[in-house]
Image (cartoon, rainbow, N blue to C red):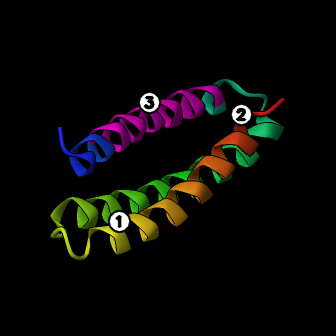
Amino acid sequence: MHSKETYENKMRHQLEELKEEIGELRNKAARAETNLQLEYYTLVDELQVKLETADQKFHLLTQAGEDDWEEFKTEFELVWGSVRELIKSVTSP
């Protein structure tokens, strides 16, 4: 398999995992004490916005030709890094 395809498959899988994590965080927020719910929902909403941006960048990445692919990969990885940092901060004890 070509490295572009391998990378896209790996990132597609990670995006799906992140969507599942956001769903779990929403459930956790729903069960949280009232004083923590607003904080959880705010973080989950912020995470959802960043995920949507990452999804858009990923779509552009998958549509890019060989010549432009590296540029789109760099843009995607910047967004993906911020998504991962936010999820880490949300899920850390």
Report whether 2 appears left or right of 89: left
On the image, the x and y values in percent for residue 65 come to 15, 70
Using the numbered discs, state the Cα–Cα distance from disc 1 to disc 2 in whole angstroms: 24 Å
Dominant secondary structure (helix, strand or loop) of the stretch shown in magenta? helix
Q: Residue at x 77, y 35 (%)?
A: 34
> Disc 3 marks which amino acid?
Glu
> Disc 2 marks which amino acid?
Thr
> Disc 1 marks which amino acid?
Lys
* Residue 34 vertical placement versus 28 (above, below): below
Image quarter (top left, top right, bottom left or bottom right) of the N terminus:
top left
Pick the residue in front: 6 or 43: 6
Location of residue 52 (image quadrant): bottom left
Residue assigned mark 1: 57
Q: Do tag 3 and tag 2 residues touch (Cβ < 8 Å)?
A: no
Which portion, as a residue range, is magenta? 9-28
* Residue 32 vertical placement versus 88 (above, below): above
Report whether 40 appears left or right of 23: right
Location of residue 71 (image quadrant): bottom left
Q: Do tag 1 and tag 2 residues touch (Cβ < 8 Å)?
A: no
Residue assigned mark 2: 91
On the image, the x and y values in percent for residue 24 come to 53, 27
Location of residue 46 (image quadrant): bottom right
10 Å neighbourhood of mark 1: few (<14), some, or many (≥20)? many
Image quarter (top left, top right, bottom left or bottom right) of the C terminus:
top right
Residue lying at the far front in this picture: please name it.
Answer: 2
N-terminal label among 3 and 1:
3
* Residue 21 vertical placement versus 85 (above, below): above
Q: Residue at x 42, y 63 (%)?
A: 76
On the image, the x and y values in percent for residue 86 come to 67, 51
Residue 10 counted in the magenta span: yes
Residue assigned mark 3: 20
